Image (spheres, rainbow, N blue to C red):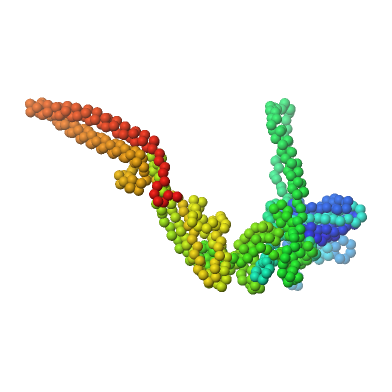
Amino acid sequence: MNLPITRVVLYKHGVGYFEREGKVDNDATLALTFKQAEVSDVLKSLTVLDLDGGHIASVSYDSTKPLAQLLSEVALSIPDSGSLVSLLPQIKGARVALHSGVGEPVEGCILGIDTTERQTGDGIVKIVLLSLVTDAGQVRSFDLHNLAGVQLLDPVLRRDLDFYLKTQLSAKKKDARTFTFFAQGQGQRTIRLSYTLEAPVWKATYRVLLGEEGKPPLIQGWAVVDNTQDEDWENVQLSLIAGLPVSFVHDLYTPRYIRRPEVKVQETTGVLPPEVEEGVEVEEMADEVMMLAAAPTAGAGKMRAMQRKLERVRAPRAASYETLQATTPAQVRERKIGDLFEYEIEHPVTIRRNQSALVPIVLRSFEGRPVLLYNKQTRAENPMRCVELKNTTGLTLEGGPVSVLEAGNYVGEAMLETTKPDDQRLVPYAVELSVHVLDNIDSHQEHVHRIVIRRGQLKAHYVQVQKTTYTLNNKSDVEQAIYLEHPRAGSEWKLFDTPEPHEITENHWRFRFALPAKKTTRFVVQQRQTLHSAYGLTDLTDHQLSLWINQKYLDAKTEKTVRSVMELRAEAGRLDAALAQLDKERTNIHNEQKRIRENLQALGDRASEKELRERFVKTLNTQEDRLEKIDKEAQAKIDARDKCREKIQDALAKLEYDAEVGAGAG
């Protein structure tokens, strides 16, 4: 007995929920067949209910050990060709009855298979002989191909052979896996079972009708539903879920085996007392275990509370065009389930196996109008024609393609993102060639408007300004509303002397204004950001200081401090130059002393040489006196230079200045 499909719920993440229901009498057996790839999903989600007091005793299904592992339980191996000749040696010793078609069968045990050659009128042929040990103890040979049959008398062997053949056959039927349900109870009862399977996602497609005089725009939505199963959906209750619940694939069907450790028996002559490790009581661990045990109960309570909050919402009837209402009424009940949204088709739906169907889900008016949208990155020369759509249908509109009709004519196509109730969207569907757009960008730097001195560094703040002028030429005979999207370079850019934007998106300011018919409209967007340049005061030149003073960057007090720093820096520079000169003189003296000492080593004891020696010694003494003076002078200049540097550091550390200057302030 098979239960028909009565309800189908399709989701947007690749699964479908299927419900079957039917009547049974007393104890009954039900069977369902699934493809092998579907079995894990069925095992993960299967629910079976006996609604009238009975119960489901068990559910059995075809297992799937690997073929090699299944056949390893049977000591048989039968090839695809020469099967009988290959089988008989494997059952050597088995009791069989040989039927020749004449007289009584001969019973005995198989001894083996022999081959021989025999001369016939057609030449030499190979003969296969079956050797048998009869019950009388005789060894006889029978031409295997002349036998009418070989009967296995061993019941165990017959079961093994039957299992082997059925297993081989089942392995070839890869897609057929049967579930058997055993229902027990008395009288007639209703059985309901449900499960989830992989299924094609349902798709949404829309038609938007614009331009009907005196009537609001209308949206008509269809769901594309595919039945890829091997079974008809006959008068099923169909629901379509918009949302993305979590789902995954998990293999529950394939048996899993683990390698178990091998334990050998150890023979001992005695038993030693065991060593027991010292235990430590940890009360905190016990407390954690209790908390973990209590958590699922609390979670289940929250889930039940959430389920009690779910309510069925009947949407109000909306105005629509009479002709469409008469031809394609969308008879849908909708309800919100958490973050999901369900379209429940009111009337039963029939979709044959391996067929698809269009099911109406939406037919309602909405707040909207045709407008223009200009985005230079999308199209530089022209704006796009859009539907300014506010979802006042009360439904969640699942994302999908849209065909737009205006005054009864096809005017373009668009893609609608998933839209919640009261959400607003601009849905572009065509290029508006009657409006041409040019833009002119002017970027310039304004004067420094702020000076900050802190920690020996001067920062000059100035403003970078970008002015974009959009020129829009509306050549059409009607006034048009347009949205203009201007890129936002970053949060540091601010608008000024520009109309307030209608909206701000992630990357754009969006302005809204009107384009009069047969006129050119100019729209100016001005934005600015504050930048700065940094200068180290210790590296300041006289030219830079003069420039800052002329531009009134510094007040008199700050100017005086900066000039004193520059004078101290100049003094430190003069001292460094003097030190360098002293160091050069010291080096020259050392080189001259080296030459003199080399000459002294070459002189002898003659009178003339003694006189020269005295001169050299006198020169060395004079040079040594000068070296001592150089060391003292150098140390004094080092002390003076370090003192200048300390004064510079002290002056810069105390100097703080922050003032607005120049005409570019603000």
Q: In this view, does 384 lie to the left or right of 575?
A: right
Quadrant the N terminus occupies: bottom right
At a point 84% along the width and 51% down the height, the residue shown is 56
At a point 37% along the width and 37% down the height, the residue shown is 652
In the image, residue 518 lies at what x, y percent?
A: 53, 71
Residue nearest the observer in this picture, 261 or 87 = 261
Residue 482 drawn above or below residue 153: below
Q: How many labels does the image show?
A: 0
Seen as rendered, the residue at the extreme left is 607
Residue 159 drawn above or below residue 220: above
In the image, residue 561 lies at what x, y percent?
A: 34, 38
Q: In this view, does 608 lie to the left or right of 317?
A: left
Which image quadrant for residue 632? top left
Residue nearest the observer in this picture, 113 or 542 = 542
In the image, residue 557 lies at what x, y percent?
A: 35, 39
In the image, residue 482 lies at what x, y percent?
A: 56, 64
Residue nearest the observer in this picture, 147 or 514 = 514
Residue 585 is at least partly visible in this image: yes
Residue nearest the observer in this picture, 17 or 55 = 17
Residue 68 drawn above or below residue 101: above
At a point 41% along the width and 54% down the height, the residue shown is 445
Q: Is residue 577 left or right of residue 656?
A: left
At a point 73% along the width and 53% down the height, the residue shown is 337
Residue 418 is at least partly visible in this image: no
